[in-house]
Image (cartoon, rainbow, N blue to C red):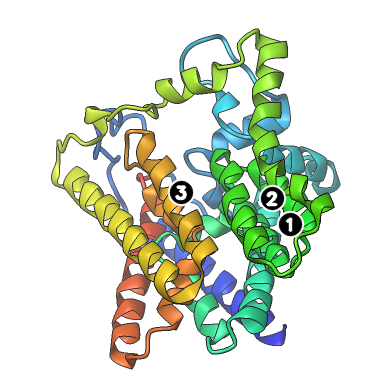
């Protein structure tokens, strides 16, 4: 526990000091990596306020939902694309923080990250005794998109809940695993896929309590409940899917998101492909060397991401697939691990710089 606290505190301080320096030292023109970006729309905003520095891009939607609720008019980029648990927690927390919704979201992410690290350590200590939990945590925190664990986004909360759910499944506390899993599914749309590793762990367990079996499918209820709310409130059970289509996420390839209009767009596409390949390779390794349930879960998450028809944000999808970091920590060759660490730290610096300066970073 002491090591987790120390590593967490060191990372949190250093990554945020770097973010403040990166935002205020470098003067940039607006981003234009994609056709849907213009320098006039997305410009650099320099600030020494550490709270506002963590509210870019999708953060605005979470802040609006927390303060004003959902809206849907049948078309356009409606905020119902964002699942409710995270903004709900922001709404509950904000009054204690003098109505500061941004601070509430940031603190929720920070505490969620700490508990994610805590459960990763417990999981590795108890079920992967040959692996160093310190290394697993370190590789997670230096992953290129790890700064998202520290901003007003859902990554940290989802990571915490998904790790905790799988931890209790490994403990054969399937009812608790299912309850935590449904919270994860209320955090992000792919969360319902947690029922897959929960079911695998149940089938592989020595004891299979019948009373716990229904709990395995609790994560599936989150999207069903959310879509039913849309049916009752907006008169359309499939409203979420229509909005996802407007966001460029549909069951078809969105060619505009693959169009390279600049060298920046080309780099982004190359990095998205890199993250995808890393995720697939790691999933195969995890199935082979770590745990079947983990690997199948990873492949299911990646398949769902690909099914949206775009690779945008794939770096964030891969970030929350925590078995990747168990796999990296299991590598015996010290030079390979050192190379991964060097590359990850440099890319983490790049993606942090991009995010805090209003550039597309996933």
Q: Residue 234: horizontal and vertical position, in percent? A: 66, 10
Q: Secondary structure at mark 3?
A: helix
Q: Which residue is mark 1?
A: 177
Q: Is residue 36 visible?
A: yes
What residue appears at the point 67 percent right and 13 percent down from the top-left corner? 231
Residues at badges 1 and 2 in contact (C-beta under 8 Å)? Answer: yes
344 or 9, nearer to the observer: 344
Q: Is residue 132 shown left or right of residue 332?
A: right
Q: Which residue is mark 2?
A: 181
Q: Secondary structure at mark 2?
A: helix
| Mark 1, other Cα within 10 Å: few <14 / some 14–19 / many ≥20 | many
319 to 71, vertically: above or below:
below
76 to 146, vertically: above or below:
above
Q: Residue 258: horizontal and vertical position, in percent? A: 21, 36
Q: Which mark is residue 64?
A: none
| Mark 2, other Cα within 10 Å: few <14 / some 14–19 / many ≥20 | many
What residue appears at the point 56 percent right and 46 percent down from the top-left corner? 193
Residue 343, image quadrant = bottom left
Q: Which residue is mark 3?
A: 300
């Amino acid at each position: 526990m002491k090591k987790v606290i120390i590593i967490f505190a060191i990372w949190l301080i250093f990554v945020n000091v770097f973010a403040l320096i990166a935002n205020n030292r470098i003067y940039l023109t607006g981003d234009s990596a994609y056709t849907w970006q213009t320098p006039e729309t997305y410009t650099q905003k320099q600030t020494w306020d550490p709270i506002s520095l963590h509210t870019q891009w999708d953060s605005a939607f979470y802040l609006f939902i927390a303060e004003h609720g959902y809206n849907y008019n049948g078309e356009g980029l409606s905020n119902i694309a964002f699942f409710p648990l995270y903004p709900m927690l922001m709404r509950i927390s904000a009054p204690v923080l003098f109505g500061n919704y941004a601070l509430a979201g940031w603190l929720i992410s920070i505490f969620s990250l700490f508990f994610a690290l805590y459960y990763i350590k417990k999981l590795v200590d108890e079920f992967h005794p040959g692996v160093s939990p310190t290394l697993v945590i370190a590789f997670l925190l230096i992953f290129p998109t790890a700064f998202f664990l520290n901003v007003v986004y859902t990554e940290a909360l989802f990571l915490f809940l998904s790790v905790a759910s799988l931890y209790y499944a490994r403990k054969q506390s399937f009812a608790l695993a299912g309850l935590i899993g449904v919270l994860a599914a209320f955090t992000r749309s792919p969360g319902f896929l947690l029922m897959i590793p929960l079911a695998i762990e149940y089938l592989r367990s020595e004891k299979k309590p019948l009373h716990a079996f229904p709990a395995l499918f609790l994560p599936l209820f989150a999207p069903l409940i959310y879509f039913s709310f849309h049916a009752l409130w907006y008169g359309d059970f499939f409203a979420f899917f229509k909005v996802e289509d407007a966001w460029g996420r549909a069951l078809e390839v969105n060619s505009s998101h693959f169009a390279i209009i600049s060298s920046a767009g080309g780099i982004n596409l190359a990095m998205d492909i890199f993250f995808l390949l890393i995720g697939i390779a790691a999933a195969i390794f995890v199935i082979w060397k770590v745990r079947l349930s983990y690997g199948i879960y990873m492949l299911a998450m990646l398949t769902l991401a690909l099914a949206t028809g775009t690779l945008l944000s794939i770096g964030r999808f891969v970030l929350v697939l925590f078995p990747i970091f168990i796999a990296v920590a299991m590598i015996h060759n010290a030079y390979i691990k050192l190379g991964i660490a060097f590359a990850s730290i440099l890319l983490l610096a790049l993606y942090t710089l991009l995010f805090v300066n209003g550039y597309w970073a996933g």
